[in-house]
Amino acid sequence: MIVSPQSMSFPDPLPLRSGASIRGYSLAYETYGTLDADKSNAVLICHALNASHHVAGTYAGQADSEGWWDTMIGPGKPVDTDRFFVIGVNNLGSCFGSTGPMHANPETGRIYGADFPVVTVEDWVDAQARLLDGLGIRTLAAVMGGSLGGMQALSWTLQYPERVRNAVVVASAPNLTAENIAFNEVARRAIVTDPDFHGGHFYEHGVVPKRGLRIARMIGHITYLSDDVMNEKFGRQLREGVVRYTTQDIEFQIESYLRYQGDKFSDYFDANTYLLITRALDYFDPALAHDGSLAKALAVARAKFLLVSFTTDWRFAPARSRELVKALLDNGRDVSYAEIDAPHGHDAFLLEDARYLGVVRSYFNRIAREAA
């Protein structure tokens, strides 16, 4: 499936939860499949921290350009683009085509840098709703996402309950635990204390805070994998096969792997975007406005739900998905839940697991039948 990125511009200001607003912004997006005449088969895919609008398919003439959820979405796949019109959108403040910190502020003509406004999950959903308006789509057959994308899918059912018929929330949570916020803060501190960060205005200095980005990615990557996967892939393997008695150079294969991941990440991801997105993760907590009651927060939802979790995911543990299931059932909602016994940790939601893909396929088959 050959695809092409698109962009939509929005001149009108978008009010943000912080009290600020942003105008003159653009959102990058891609579409897959064909929109029905009655525009009833649209599926919105919300991305996680370091993903983008390039959800599925490949770019013409570019090898190894598969979308980040290509195992899930495409012709004949669980989210079948022969039946559904799928939309992938890059969030405001990201660094893959939508307006973000590396772009010029139309108010000043200067690069936003650290002055880019703080955005929340709710702000992203509002921006996505405007994109759908521009595409002439009033109601979504489904909204779907994993991890942070799952938070957006959940928020869609609360902010625009009349526009969502189904929500698929994978490896996600109703809010972050203190431990998760702590991991995000350590990663942010690695970035902001990098001498090349320059208070977030490193663009003006022609540098990139790569050291901070490398460490941030290494910290994050540790939390995405399970202990079982790390031990199976690396164990205590020595890089050179013998102990070299060094405190600064690489000794173990796991160290080499983490440094590789950090180096790769620092070459393509924006430091200010990392700060923005991890803070949006921290802020998400729909129960906060309801005296901490998740059931009260979810009372407005009208969609049917599929929730999926993975047994070895300790960053977004199955217990967090079960909290959502209980709160939805307390409100009498139609909820399906699958807890997949998979060894891959949080990254399992991106991988090819026959049981996981089968659950999603069955759910979307049901959506298609109900729409027929």
Image: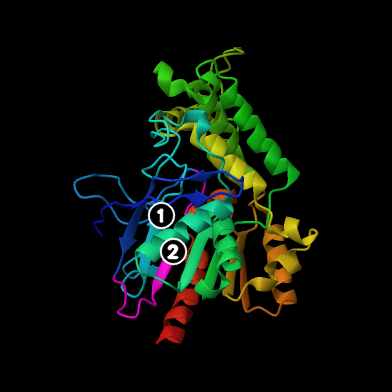
| Residue depicted at x 65% and y 44% | 282
Marking on residue 89:
1
Q: Nearer the viewer, residue 327 or 74?
A: 327
* Residue sitting farthest toward the left: 61
Q: Main secondary structure of the magenta part?
A: loop
> Mark 2 belongs to which amino acid?
Leu
Quick check: is 41 in the magenta stretch?
Answer: yes
Real-space Cα distance between discs 2 and 1? 8 Å
Position above or below: 76 against 174: below
Q: Position of residue 362 (x, y in %)?
A: 48, 76
Which contiguous range is marked in magenta?
A: 34-49
How many numbered dots are placed on residues in this image? Answer: 2
Confirm whether residue 120 shows in the render: yes
State whether residue 351 appears in this view.
no
Residue 34 sits above or below residue 234 on the image? below
Q: Nearer the viewer, residue 344 or 297?
A: 297
- Looking at the rendered image, the quarter that the C terminus falls into is bottom left
Numbered circle sitting on residue 44: 2
- The type of residue carrying mark 1 is Val
